[in-house]
Amino acid sequence: MEFINFYRLFHDPIWTIILSAALFFPVRQLIWVLYVRKKQKTQKEVSEEEKKFLKKRAAFTSILLCVVFSYIYVNQVFK
């Protein structure tokens, strides 16, 4: 019986974390490509330093998007 109580308590956070982790890498890559293409419109060449900075920026943005989307999705599907 103790496992059932544990499952009910941590069901939503566990699924939110799993879904966020699964979405993080493709979303980060997509956002990074969009950032680089936008930068290439203003400049012909994007340096490696700028690409690293844009990758960090894309990672931060994708973390926010994935966590928010996962939380909303889990609440809609499992409730």
Image (cartoon, grey):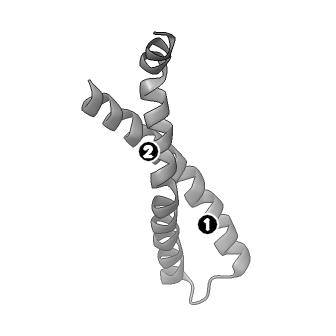
Q: Residue furthest front?
A: 1
Q: Amino acid at mark 1?
A: Leu
Element under label 2? Answer: helix
Q: CA distance from mark 1 to mark 2?
A: 24 Å
Residue at the (52%, 51%) spot, across then down: 61
Q: Amino acid at mark 2?
A: Leu
Instruction: Say which of marks 1 and 2 sits in front.
Output: 2
Q: Which residue is mark 2?
A: 19
Nearest the viewer among 9 and 29 is: 9
Quarter of the view holding residue 57: bottom right
Q: Which residue is mark 1?
A: 54
Element under label 1? Answer: helix
> Dot 2 surroundings within 10 Å: few (below 14), some, or many (20 or more)?
some
Residue at the (48%, 22%) spot, across then down: 10
Mark 1 or mark 2, which has the lower sequence index? 2
Quadrant, the N terminus? top left
Quadrant, the C terminus? top left
Say above or below: 9 vs 45: above
